[in-house]
Amino acid sequence: MVFRTFHHFAKPMPRGGAAPHPESSFVVPRRLAAPDGFAPISLRPLTESDEEEWSSVRLRNRDWLSPWDSNDPFDGPGIGYREWIRAQRDSERDGSGIIFAVEYAGHIVGQISLGAITYGSVRSGIIGYWIDQDYAGRGFTPLAVAILVDWAFHCGNGPRLHRVEVDILPENERSLRVVEKLGFADEGLRRGYMFVRHAWRDHRSFALLSSDVRGALADRLPKD
């Protein structure tokens, strides 16, 4: 299976490059689990062995996800799944991004990513996500975002970011409800922000600062 685009923030590191500085890197977690009392979802890095299941979920949800998928404005040849996974490993090594499968009952039901990670005096990243249509409306997406943010903000061997951002097409009402539930601040419209459905589309930008979150972000969500 060949895809035109995956995540616009992937940034491979040249092989053989210098090891990342500990202040601009993170330890890749084997799994991030939902806190007690919530739906038992977990996040884990995608691997090459996930190709068949991941591709099946994406294919089954093609019509559900295609209105929100980004495209390559130069209509490049695309990359295959295994090449994409290798690029993920490079991004993890240089601390620029990480992509997780969202798992429920041992199956992949979605994906969530933290990319465009910047360190130094900025320390920020951009979150992207999608969910299998069969599991939409069950609170899995806001919970996955909360799990990811709590790791990115507070985990000692995580990226320890100051700010995370989510950028959403104005007509994507389901995604807008995700950031609303979690209390992200609406920072306004970004004109022509991303190439989606073969055109540069405006996006609404939402952000959360580490100082906005007292305790765990997941505590803002109802428990099961």
Image (cartoon, helix red, strand yellow):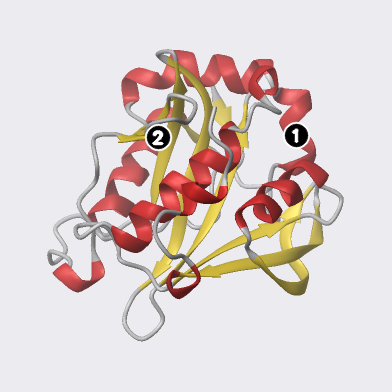
Tell me what residue is drawn at x 71 percent, y 24 percent: 62
Q: CA distance from mark 1 to mark 2?
A: 28 Å
Q: Quadrant of residue 216?
A: bottom left
Q: Nearer the viewer, mark 1 or mark 2?
A: 2
Q: Indicate the amino acid at tag 2.
A: Ala
Q: Kindly state the secondary structure of the residue where label 2 is placed.
A: loop
Q: Where does label 1 land, which residue?
A: 66
Image position, residue 21 (x, y; %):
16, 71
Name which residue lies at 70% across and 22% down. 133
Q: Earlier in the sequence, mark 1 or mark 2?
A: 2
Under tag 1, what secondary structure?
helix
Q: Position of residue 158 (x, y in %)?
A: 26, 57
Q: Quadrant of residue 186?
A: bottom right
Above or below, 128 relative to 116: above
Q: Mark 1 belongs to which amino acid?
A: Ser
Instruction: Assess disc 1: are there few (<14), some (14-19) or many (≥20) residues with their C-alpha within 10 Å of its C-alpha.
Output: few
Q: Can the viewer see residue 179 in this picture?
A: yes
Residue bearing the label numbered 2: 34
Q: Position of residue 176 (x, y in %)?
A: 75, 51
Residue 188 higher or lower than 180, as above or below = below
